[in-house]
Amino acid sequence: LWSPTGDYAGGRDKLGLGLPPHSDSPYTESGHQRWPHTESGRRDWALARTKVVFIFAGREYRFLSGQFADPKPIIGSIFASYAGLGGIYIPFTAEPHVNNDVPEFVLPFNACHEVAHQRGVAREDEANYVGFRVARDYGDPDFVYSAYFGIDGHVVSALQQVDPELARKIWDRRSPALKADGAAYRKWHETRQSRLRGVSDAVNSAYLKSNG
């Protein structure tokens, strides 16, 4: 566990060097000028780009290849945020649906996670890993950043179970951009807290039925 985590941290710590934190513009600004200039345009771009990401990944990993439905935004995404859902895969229609209310720097990783489910990766931790690998290996700066941001807490949490001191050191080594976006994400999350979180299973079930 130590060696892979060290390699991961080394790649992560190179992120954001010379770039302003995404959260300089509340929650959303990516800092990469080739993104569309409107928020809705950037979100649509990220979802559409996810298909291309998996086309490239499918050339190396055959189980990720094939013709599938594109990821779609969840209708009423803000309610998914209240329920604590980053996305949902509808097995009856084979469609990945992504919470479009999350901060932009979270969206590419979440989209890749849901598409991993579509490709047959059932377990949540394995979908996290596949989502991270395909987003990172594609090489697009925004997808790479989102991959590391999305998986960071999971990696450090796993390491903490065996070496809390090393986990803390790796957590504290995050770049200024990651730290700033982490604070912005926590602030966003606080604004979405709701008693609906306690009934997220009911929301999930209702959405499945509506798309069945």
Image (cartoon, helix red, strand yellow):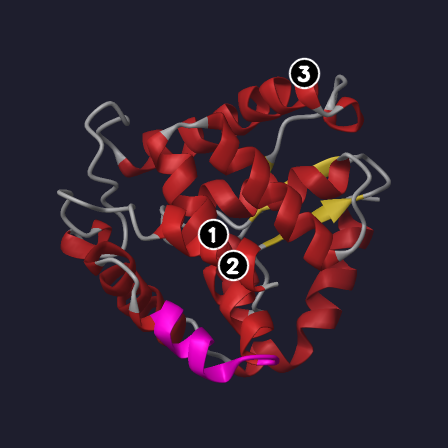
Q: Residues within 10 Å of mark 3 (few under 14, many from 20)?
A: few
* Most common secondary structure along the magenta stretch: helix
Q: Is residue 205 above or below residue 77?
A: below
Disc on the earlier residue, 3 or 1:
1
Q: Amino acid at mark 2?
A: Thr
- Nearest to the observer: residue 192 or residue 184: 184
Q: Amino acid at mark 1?
A: Tyr
Q: Is residue 40 above or below residue 52?
A: below
The picture places residue 6, in percent across and down from the top left corner, at: 46, 57
The quadrant holding residue 38 is top left
Residue at image mark 2: 5
Q: Which residues are magenta?
A: 161-171
Which callout, 3 or 2, points to the residue nearer the camera?
2
As for residue 50 lying within the magenta part, the answer is no
Left or right: 204 in relation to 142: right
Left or right: 20 in relation to 117: left
Disc number for residue 59 = 3
Residue at disc 2, secondary structure: helix
Left or right: 133 in relation to 20: right
Residue at image mark 1: 8
Is residue 73 visible in the rendered image? The answer is: no
Q: Amino acid at mark 3?
A: Arg
Find out whether the residues at labels 3 and 1 contact each other: C-beta distance under 8 Å.
Answer: no
Gap in Å between the C-alphas at discs 1 and 2? 5 Å
Residue at disc 1, secondary structure: helix
